[in-house]
Image (spheres, grey):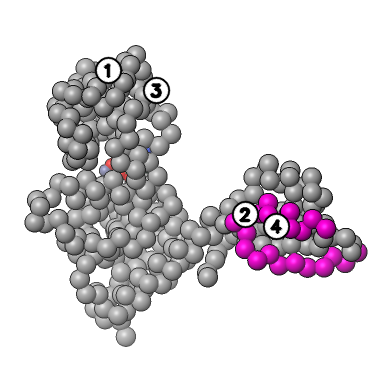
């Protein structure tokens, strides 16, 4: 029998850079969420899991306060929340259960393209626009740089053009937005990606089991996404050389071919994809029928 409140509640970003990847991850884990549900909470149909759609900045606090059991959030948001706390409230806030393979970005300091940059001293007494005042202060304090904070919640990249700031400290992934706004990166303040966190405190065995199952599935999904299934026909005389080109592949399965005694078929799971260059080298060694296939699911 299900105990009261035994559904696991997960907070994730409602709309933004993490929302699609977060939803896709849970779908890949076999959780059937009715994606049409527009409200604050959606219910999984096939597992005792509820999803709470919120602003990403609210996720750390929802987990810390125990409103939800799990949260999918960027480490940048976690660290900003952590640094914003009073010293005595800083420890044992949540557990990081696993790193996720999306939301990769960096918090960087950027300045106008027409300004030359020599070193960090450039920032002495400058005005810096950011939505991450604590991460920025933490970084510049360590370097003994004083600055004037221009705190903005969005569109930070336009601040230098409006003469609100001399520099910005903002999240970057490709750098395209910076370029469009006539800025370039000069210092990396923090490197981030998404992670799964859980609240502290005792959970029922039932919930613990669901969470453990979810972690195993998430790790399986990530592993599968990083891995490829490789099949090829290799000349028996060049087997060692072929294997040495396939770094990341463990213990290939070797099978006889029906009508060819000079070659064997090799099947293997590789933790790396096969680049065109490696495929060309394999071909030059006499390998043929080289196939690289995506893996849908994986459990070790
Ligand atoms: P919300 O309305 O939920 O507060 P937001 O505007 O603060 O949304 P997004 O821009 O959607 O947030 O970014 C959410 C998270 O995605 C960031 O905190 C960060 O962890 C991650 N992220 C990955 N790449 C980038 C990027 N290039 N720029 C901004 N955030 C990124
Ligand atoms: Zn936000």
Q: Quadrant of residue 230?
A: bottom right
Residue 109: x and y in percent read: 29, 30
Instruction: Determine the CA span between mark 3 and mark 1.
Output: 12 Å
State yes or no: Cβ of the residue under disc 3 lies below 8 Å from any atom of ligand 1: no
Image depth: mark 4 or mark 3 in front: 4
> Which quadrant of the render holds ligand 1?
top left
Is there any visible trace of residue 294 in the rendered image?
no
As helix, strand or loop, the secondary structure at mark 2 comes to loop
Residue at mark 2: 247
As helix, strand or loop, the secondary structure at mark 1 comes to loop
Image depth: mark 2 or mark 3 in front: 2
Tag shown at residue 31: none
Residue 264: x and y in percent read: 81, 63
Instruction: Determine the CA span between mark 4 and mark 3.
Output: 46 Å
Residue at mark 4: 243
| Relative side of 23 to 249, left or right | left
As helix, strand or loop, the secondary structure at mark 3 comes to helix
Range of magenta residues: 237-259
Tag shown at residue 161: 1
Residues tagged 4 and 2 counted as in contact (Cβ below 8 A): no
């Amino acid at each position: 029998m299900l105990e009261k409140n035994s559904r696991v509640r997960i907070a994730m970003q409602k709309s933004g850079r993490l929302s699609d990847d977060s939803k896709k991850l849970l779908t890949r884990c076999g959780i059937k969420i009715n994606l049409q549900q527009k409200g604050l909470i959606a219910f999984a149909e096939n597992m005792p899991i509820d999803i709470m759609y919120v602003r990403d900045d609210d996720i750390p606090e929802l987990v810390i306060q125990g409103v939800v059991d799990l949260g999918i959030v960027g480490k940048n948001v976690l660290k900003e929340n952590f640094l914003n706390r009073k010293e005595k409230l800083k420890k044992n806030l949540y557990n990081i259960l696993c790193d996720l393979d999306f939301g990769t970005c960096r918090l960087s300091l950027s300045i106008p393209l027409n300004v030359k940059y020599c070193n960090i001293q450039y920032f002495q007494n400058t005005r810096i626009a950011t939505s991450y005042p604590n991460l920025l202060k933490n970084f510049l304090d360590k370097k003994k740089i004083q600055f004037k904070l221009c705190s903005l919640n969005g569109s930070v990249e336009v601040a230098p053009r409006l003469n609100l700031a001399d520099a910005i400290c903002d999240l970057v992934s490709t750098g395209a937005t910076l370029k469009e706004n006539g800025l370039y990166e000069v210092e990396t303040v923090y490197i981030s990606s998404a992670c799964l966190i859980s609240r502290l405190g005792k959970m029922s065995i039932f919930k613990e089991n669901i969470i453990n199952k979810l972690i195993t599935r998430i790790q399986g999904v990530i592993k599968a996404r990083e891995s490829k299934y490789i099949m090829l026909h290799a000349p028996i005389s060049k087997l060692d050389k072929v294997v040495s080109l396939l770094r990341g592949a463990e213990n290939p399965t070797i099978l006889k071919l029906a009508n060819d005694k000079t070659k064997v078929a090799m099947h293997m799971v590789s933790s790396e994809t096969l680049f065109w260059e490696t495929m060309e080298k394999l071909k030059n060694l006499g390998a043929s029928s080289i196939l690289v296939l995506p893996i849908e699911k994986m459990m070790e």
